[in-house]
Amino acid sequence: MPRTNFDDLLKAGVHFGHLKRKWNPHMAPYIFMERNGIHIIDLYKTQAKIDEAAAALKQIAHSGKKVLFVATKKQAKDVVSEVVKNVNMPYVTERWPGGMLTNFATIRKAVRKMSAIDRQMASSNYKNLSKREKLQIERERTKLEKNLGSISELNRLPSALFVVDIIKEHIAVAEAKKLGIPTFAIVDTNADPNQVDFPIPANDDAAKSIELIVKAMCDAIQEGLDERKLDKEKREEDDSVETDEENENDSDNFEDENGEDANDDDKRQQRRRRSAK
């Protein structure tokens, strides 16, 4: 069963592409027709690509890995941050920090600096600082929070990258490709779908279109996380059952050994009595 309803895709305006003169020829397989100089995306192909991408993301989440969402365009910022927060995945909705993936160690230093500022602000020495020094520290903390707060829990490179608008986020896509990180993206008719591993042909300018697709991806991720949790609980139950069985077997063996020792003692005593007679 498809993850998205055809009517919902239609209502969200997922089928609207860009002007014909702005199109990328590599998007030809995903274009249904042209109307009033605007390309119309084939929603049946969009549905199929959504299901394909969702299945892959579900598997990544099931394995306990992180997916980084990137959406810095105005109409995508709030939508992506609200939806992605629910599945506890990292996201970038402000300016993409150059080298975020290829120079990840430096980005981690900046995140650690943010933690150090938090510790400093919580210490007793902070109260003794002047007003100006406090203001400088608070401004630096606010700036770091704005740019890196959403990736503070990302301790290692993500296992996948989901992008809204690969033209605007071309640096992020290039860094992911360089490191061999799988890329998922909403690709409009003016972009090249061959630049990413899992392209989803759709309108990347309408907030409703973005929300619908990102929500479908996050639902798949949540399913993967839930299945991982169930598998973990099942393994723990199986381990506890095996431990109980082993303890029972050890107890039975111990009783058998004690019984055999008692029988041996009885036989020895009987032999002594016969020899005494």
Image (spheres, rainbow, N blue to C red):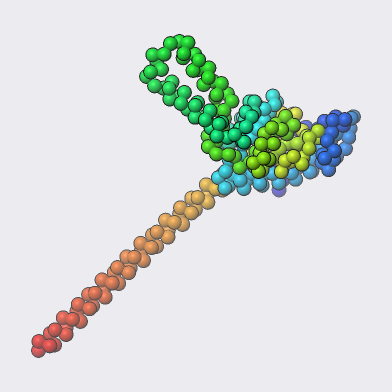
In the rendered picture of this protein, how many numbered marks are placed on residues? 0
Question: Which sits in the foreground, 18 or 212?
Answer: 18
Where residue 204 appears, x then y in whole percent?
74, 32
Judged left or right of residue 8, residue 24 is right
Q: Position of residue 273 (x, y in %)?
A: 12, 85
Q: Residue at x 53, y 19 (%)?
A: 140
Is residue 221 visible from the viewing direction of this image? no
- One can see residue 99 in this view: yes
The quadrant holding residue 216 is top right
Write down the quadrant of residue 8 in the picture.
top right
Residue in the foreground of this view, choosing between 56 and 47: 56
Q: Residue at position x 53%, y 37% from top? A: 155
Left/right of residue 174 with respect to residue 228 in the rendered view: right
Residue beneath the point at 84% across and 30% down: 22
Q: Nearer the viewer, residue 108 or 258?
A: 108
Across and down, in percent, residue 76 comes to 68, 28
Q: Nearer the viewer, residue 16 or 95?
A: 95
Residue 75 lies, with reference to residue 84, above or below; the image says: above
The residue positioned 71% from the left and 38% from the top of the image is: 185
- Quadrant placement of the C terminus: bottom left
> Whole-percent x and y of residue 48?
75, 45
**276 versus 74 height, above or below:** below
